């Protein structure tokens, strides 16, 4: 098999878009299939740590992201009620010097649009929901919900928490509802000017069982964003999110600091999302199929590293295909798993525990990681 044989990426989320772009740039004949008819600018933000920005540099969009994003000088953790500082983690210039790239926060829709624009648009297919894969011959046959089929030599499942490829490898199993929800809202910074309060560029407000993470999602600091973690014993809605309300937010954050109350007062629309997880999977690949991102290690978002892990996966997968050669795809896939499993599982665990940066700690193992420089752990052949 040479680089001109076909690789299919299922899902054009953040992990799939990264995989598609990196494979195409490396010269692999790669097609990306996305179930959605189009993408819209959903109201959400995302952190991009230096570990991800190094992959963005390789894709060629680091400068654009640096121009687009907010550059917090610190990640602050504060007590939700008293406002006391629990930690001050230096970012800004420190991150650039110490970890080799910037730490930014951006609008998720802006990031996604930019990443998708780096794909070969002729090889990006919307409205293609994969419903079956047949990996029994010398090609994989993919069947889509619209009744069409296509074939590929290798198929990458970047199809998120309810992955069809994961189901093919391991059988049907719903993700675990963590018992926590996340509220998400974008607030116009203009409204906040009415308050004599300091709205910091990146701050997490904590109490025993809940928190609110707050940051700007644009470089001009016009859009401020919060995302919460709040316990809710059951998720009965059967959808990926529902509308929430100011009243619900007030109740959830009763007694919290005036800065948090101001954010709730300024909220126009707020949505509520169930936080889903899986335990580390026993299998990441089989024959011509391989998983990445939320398809194989979905996690609570409390380290702000879920998409980061998906994007690092994509970069490591391409590195391993280059290293071993796509002809030996099973070795390449195993090398990829060997070099990703421990890190992804550790991030899953810390995210689950929701302890990240609550106290002063050294985040270098996450932010300092360079997927292109880290020595490859080699396969143990018997
Ligand atoms: P997804 O983003 O879910 O993409 C999967 C794609 O596959 C989708 O486009 C979907 O439509 C498509 N698809 C699914 N099934 C099929 C099919 N059968 N056929 C074709 N296409 C299909 N991460 C961070 O790094 N930083 C953060 O700050 C952060 N904040 C978060 C806040 C919240 C509230 C949540 C819930 C998550 C957060 N995350 C964050 C985590 C992050 O969103 C996910 O880990 C990340 O989106 C995973 O990327 P992915 O590409 O693996 O999956």
Image (spheres, rainbow, N blue to C red):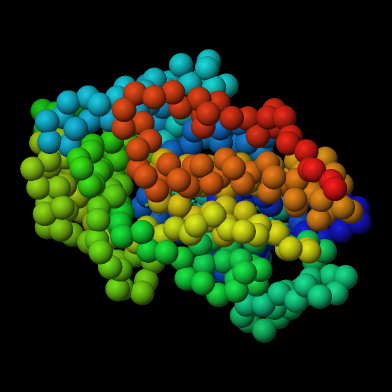
Total numbered labels placed on residues in the image: 0
Q: Where, by quadrant of the figure, is residue 46 drawn?
A: top left
User: Residue lying farthest left?
Assistant: 255
x then y, percent, for residue 27: 82, 46
Left or right, residue 300 beside residue 111: left
Left or right, residue 261 beside residue 303: left
Residue nearest the observer in this picture, 321 or 71: 321
Q: Residue at x 39, y 24 (%)?
A: 361
Q: Where, by quadrant of the figure, is residue 159 drawn?
A: bottom right
Left or right, residue 146 beside residue 320: left
Q: Is residue 42 visible?
A: yes
Q: In this view, does 53 lie above or below 263?
A: above
User: Residue lying farthest front?
Assistant: 382
Q: Can residue 101 be seen in this view?
A: no
Q: Residue at x 12, y 51 (%)?
A: 250
User: Residue lying farthest right?
Assistant: 1
Q: Is residue 114 above or below residue 58?
A: below
Look at the image and tell me in which quarter the N terminus lies.
bottom right
x then y, percent, for residue 87: 29, 24
x then y, percent, for residue 209: 23, 47
Left or right, residue 228 beside residue 24: left
x then y, percent, for residue 212: 25, 43
Q: Which residue is drawn at 61% across and 66% down?
A: 166
Q: Which residue is drawn at 19% across and 32% down?
A: 79
């Amino acid at each position: 098999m040479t680089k001109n044989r076909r690789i299919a990426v299922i899902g054009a989320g953040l992990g799939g878009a990264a995989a598609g772009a990196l494979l195409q740039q490396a010269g692999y004949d790669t097609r990306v299939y996305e179930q959605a008819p189009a993408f819209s600018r959903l109201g959400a933000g995302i952190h991009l740590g230096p570990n991800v920005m190094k992959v963005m540099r390789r894709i060629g969009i680091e400068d654009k992201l640096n121009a687009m994003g907010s550059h917090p000088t610190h990640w602050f953790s504060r007590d939700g009620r008293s406002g006391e500082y629990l930690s001050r983690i230096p970012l800004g210039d420190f991150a650039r010097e110490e970890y080799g790239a910037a730490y930014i926060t951006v609008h998720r829709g802006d990031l996604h649009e930019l990443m998708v624009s780096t794909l070969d648009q002729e090889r990006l297919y919307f409205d293609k929901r994969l419903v079956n894969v047949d990996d029994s011959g010398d090609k994989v046959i993919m069947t889509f919900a619209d009744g069409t089929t296509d074939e590929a030599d290798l198929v990458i499942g970047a199809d998120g928490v309810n992955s069809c490829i994961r189901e093919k490898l391991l059988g049907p199993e719903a993700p675990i509802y963590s018992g926590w929800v996340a509220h998400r809202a974008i607030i116009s910074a203009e409204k906040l000017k009415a308050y004599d309060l300091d709205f910091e560029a990146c701050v997490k407000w904590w109490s025993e069982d809940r928190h609110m993470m707050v940051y700007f999602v644009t470089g001009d600091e016009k859009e401020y964003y919060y995302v919460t973690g709040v316990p809710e014993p059951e998720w009965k809605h059967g959808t990926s999110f529902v509308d929430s309300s100011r009243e619900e937010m007030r109740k959830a954050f009763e007694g919290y600091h005036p800065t948090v109350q101001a954010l709730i007062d300024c909220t126009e629309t707020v949505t509520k999302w169930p936080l889903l997880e899986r335990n580390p999977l026993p299998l990441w690949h089989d024959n011509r199929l391989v998983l990445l991102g939320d398809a194989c290690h979905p996690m609570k978002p409390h380290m702000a590293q879920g998409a980061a892990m998906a994007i690092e996966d994509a970069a490591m997968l391409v590195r391993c295909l280059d290293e071993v050669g796509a002809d030996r795809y099973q070795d390449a896939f195993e090398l990829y798993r060997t070099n990703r499993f421990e890190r992804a599982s550790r991030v899953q665990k810390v995210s689950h525990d929701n302890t990240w940066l609550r106290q002063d700690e050294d985040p270098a193992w996450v932010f300092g990681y360079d997927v292109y420089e880290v020595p490859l752990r080699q396969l143990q052949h018997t």
